[in-house]
Amino acid sequence: QVQLVESGGGLVQPGGSLRLSCLASGSNLDYYAFAWFRQAPGKEREGVLCINSAGGDTSLADSVKGRFTISRDDAKNTVYLQMNGLKPEDSAVYYCAADPKGGSYCPMLEYEYWGQGTQVTVSS
């Protein structure tokens, strides 16, 4: 069983930055793939970025390319989402997800474990 706890959300002005953290607990997390998703009110959940067990990352949304990056620190069991150049349309609840098939192509995974989410609001 894996538990995920997101943190780092909040209110930020357009053009600002935030770093979200996802603290994972469980066994053999080094072998897991992780991803960040987001969901805005009235919209479907959208994949943002994912990272496999080898540290290879893939963007899941064209809208964040060049602005958001994902990273992992396996020693701290933590996955990060660095968000720069934030726009009002980035406002959403951001969720961390994990899947034990970490060697697979991470955009194709149906993530097994999910966190509760952290709210990000971009507004002046």
Image (spheres, grey):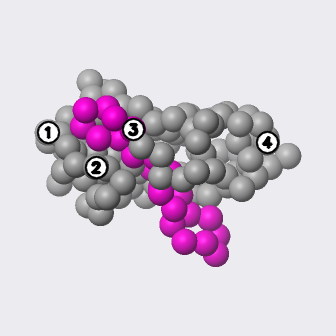
Above or below, 59 relative to 74: below
Q: Which residue is mark 2?
A: 105
Q: Nearer the viewer, residue 55 or 3?
A: 55
* Contact between labelled residues 1 and 4, with CB atoms less than 8 Å apart: no
CA gap between label 4 and label 1 equals 38 Å
What whole-number distance in Å separates the C-alpha atoms at marks 2 and 3? 10 Å
First in sequence: mark 4 vs mark 2: 4
Residue 5 appears in view: no
**Residue in view at x 31 percent, y 50 percent:** 106
Tag 2's secondary structure?
A: loop
Point 67% across, 55% down: residue:
91
For mark 1, does the 10 Å Cα neighbourhood hold few (<14), some (14 to 19), or many (20 or more) residues?
A: few
Looking at the rendered structure, the secondary structure element under dot 4 is loop
Which badge, 2 or 3, is on the more N-terminal residue?
3
User: Dot 3 lies on which element?
Assistant: strand
> Going by the image, does 15 lie left or right of 93?
right
Q: Position of residue 50 (x, y in %)?
A: 39, 46
| CA distance separating discs 2 and 1 | 18 Å
Region of the chain picked out in magenta, as a range: 36-57
Image position, residue 8 (x, y; %): 55, 39
Q: Quadrant of residue 54?
A: top left
Whether residues under marks 1 and 3 lie with C-beta atoms below 8 angstroms apart, the answer is: no
Q: Residue 80: name its quadrant.
A: top left
Q: CA distance from mark 1 to mark 3?
A: 19 Å
3 vs 4, front mark = 3
Q: The disc labelled 4 sits on which kind of residue?
A: Pro
Residue in the image at 71% along x and 36% along y:
85
Residue 28: mark in rendering: 1
CA–CA distance in space, label 3 to label 4: 25 Å
Circle 2 or circle 1, nearest the eye = 2
Check disc 3 and report the residue beneath it.
57
Dot 2 amino acid type? Tyr
